[in-house]
Amino acid sequence: MNVSVKGTVGFMKILIAPDSFKGTLSAEKAVKIISHAARRVFDDYSFVNMPLADGGEGTAALLTSFLGGRLETVTVEGPFGKPCTAHVGFVDGGRCAIIESSEAIGLPLAGKRANPEKTSSYGVGQMISYATSKGAHKVILTLGGSSTNDCGAGMLSAMGISFVDICGNRFSPVGGTLHRVETVEFNQAFSKYSDVDFTLLCDVKNPLLGPSGCAAVFAAQKGADASGIKRLEDGAVKFDRVIKRVTGTNYAAAEGAGAAGGIAYGAMAFLGAKVASGIDTVLDVYKFAKTARECDLVVTGEGSFDSQSLMGKAVGGVLERLESDTPCVIFCGRYDGTAVPENVSVVPIANGQSDEEAQLNASDNLLRCAEQFFAQWRDR
């Protein structure tokens, strides 16, 4: 392994702050492996463990735990309406709820049937309803890893919004039926959300529509074919036209509106939700910058480090907050050669392995490469 090791001699403290290696290692697991490798190499060095998430899977649990909150279990509808178990985090004495949308509508829940024309975000609305019924006046909703492309219509249906077709029939739209929406009715149940503050944490900046929109960029990952992507786009265009007329809002082009299949769009238009960077919020809560300044080496990582990593993802957020003289290493499953600052080293841990081999051997690969890097660092 050819690694460029940078830094000064005699460091005493290491910050270990990886994201998950999607599909293989959780952030917590990655922290344990890297910490274990460091302990094998160093005798008297201290470590700060800081597993990261950027608004996607794991964000709610990490924030709830770090803030000393509690997780409550709730049964909601999954992507196809089948009951599933989700968790709602409560912090600040229960006044603030942290909800992870993927717990109800994550792509793994859709499985082999994944199809964003048929999946619904209804379960997310049920989680929000549960949180507010328990007294939460602020909701932090983390977006990422969704199986849906319904512009949040399912979520809003569960919260008391009625969508009406040309025949006057009320229904809960999915991605493939958004084009049927002709008007919207606000039920009494929806009024309780008027005094709730909504913040959306996401790791993408995509708008709702167009070549950078949620259908064009993400629907294929969720099971849509080319014709399905066009139908989803056309449906979202029609839906946006109706929502503009009914609400007087105009959020289709807003940064992040396309997050989680357009859930962000629906939340902006109907709930007055504000979008925040998931990783920035997590790093603020952790007081990352202050901790990093006190450390002599920062270790981070993710499944694939590429140009997208620098656009709102966890590793990109870490790099943005590092001082230029703080050495950093990025462990990653794959690396596309994206340029990094002089103080940063990139260590691909799966070179020469197929995707299947890399996933199977992820733990061993990370442990081996971390040990090798730390040994070189120690002996520099």
Image (cartoon, rainbow, N blue to C red):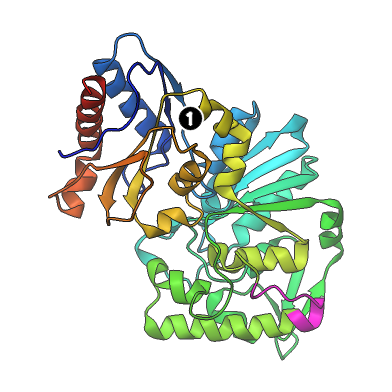
Left or right: where 235 falls relative to 20: right
Q: Residue at x 65, y 81 (%)?
A: 239
Quadrant containing the N terminus in the rendered view: top left
Q: Residue 250's spot in the image, x, y percent? A: 73, 76
**Relative vertical location of residue 374 with respect to residue 156 in this rendering, above or below:** above
Left or right: where 321 falls relative to 192: left
**Relative vertical location of residue 104 with respect to residue 375 in this rendering, above or below:** below
Q: Which residue is mark 1?
A: 50
**Residue 250 magenta:** yes
The type of residue carrying mark 1 is Met
Q: Which residues fall within the magenta stretch? A: 244-253
For mark 1, does the 10 Å Cα neighbourhood hold few (<14), some (14 to 19), or many (20 or more) residues? Answer: many
Quadrant containing the C terminus in the rendered view: top left
- The overriding secondary structure of the stretch rendered in magenta is loop
Q: Residue 262's spot in the image, x, y percent? A: 59, 68
**Relative vertical location of residue 30 with respect to residue 203 in this rendering, above or below:** above
Residue 212 in sight from this viewpoint: yes
